[in-house]
Amino acid sequence: MNAPILLRGGGDLASGVALRLHHAGQNLIITELAQPLAVRRTVSFAEAVYSGKITIEDVEGRLAGSAAEALALSQMGIVAVLVDPQAAILREGSFAALVDARLIKRPPETSLSSAPLTIGLGPGFSAGENVHAVVETQRGHTLGRVYWKGSASPDSGKPEGDPRRVLRAPTGGKLIAHAQIGEHIAAGQVVAEVAGEPVTAPFKGVLRGLIHPGIEVPRGMKIGDIDLRDDPTYCFLVSDKALSIGGGVLEAILTRRTQPSA
């Protein structure tokens, strides 16, 4: 039996990592919140928490009702998704590696002793201190690089590309959707509402992401994303960024296997 790899977080970047690892023959379990907040839901395994299962490109993810079921699904080659915010499953089985893909951008509770190999994505992690390796998540020449010492680039606090593409909650309250991911959107069109206040598109494009309807969101939270390229097929493909980060994670895993003292 191959020891699975545990990913904390099932958003779009974490799901790109999962695709890379799955295609390389790794068994995977993803832990998530009871109400995941993924925006790019069509390419996020976290969506299985709501729908029971999801297929991203050619890979199936399925919600598990227990740690035992998650472990069994992973051995079947299915990406298991488990509601387990504290990653208590670490005490239920043996894992080859732990990838903290929550992108919380602050020092995590992850430690070097959490698994034989611990990998952190992006800011908040320090290789040799709270994880064994860090993978860069910021776009540029260092995207996807693996650091065995030091940290990734600090959080800039700004969205990549045109900042207007990011839709945020105008107030706190329940989100109601008025458009579907992949839908062509006109400038000024109402995409959603929060507590009765509309969320409108800043320009023409495709609705690339929108968090799950019915969730209570705080004011200012990122709830959606408009893609200027206006191509709906991109909404159902894992991004180049996610795959690059996934390549870095795979490199870290293979490096540790061939060079245990890395």
Image: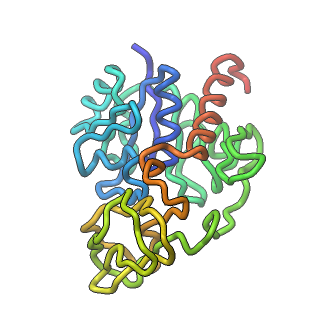
- Using the image, determine if residue 22 lies above or below residue 194: above
Q: Quadrant of residue 219?
A: bottom left
Residue for point 64% across, 69% down: 157
- Decide which of 177, 122 is in the foreground and name it: 177
Residue for point 28% across, 70% down: 177
- Decide which of 251, 175 is in the foreground and name it: 175
Q: What quarter of the picture does the C terminus occupy?
A: top right
Q: How many marks?
A: 0
Q: What quarter of the picture does the N terminus occupy?
A: top left
Q: Quadrant of residue 31?
A: top left
Does residue 29 appear left or right of residue 150 in this picture? Answer: left
- Decide which of 152, 181 is in the foreground and name it: 181
Residue 221: give x, y in percent of width and height: 45, 73
Does residue 193 appear left or right of residue 188 in this picture? Answer: left
- Decide which of 180, 14 is in the foreground and name it: 180
Residue 76: give x, y in percent of width and height: 31, 20
Q: Identify the image's colour scheme: rainbow, by chain, secondary structure or one colour.
A: rainbow
Residue for point 31% across, 67% down: 179
Q: Quadrant of residue 33?
A: bottom left
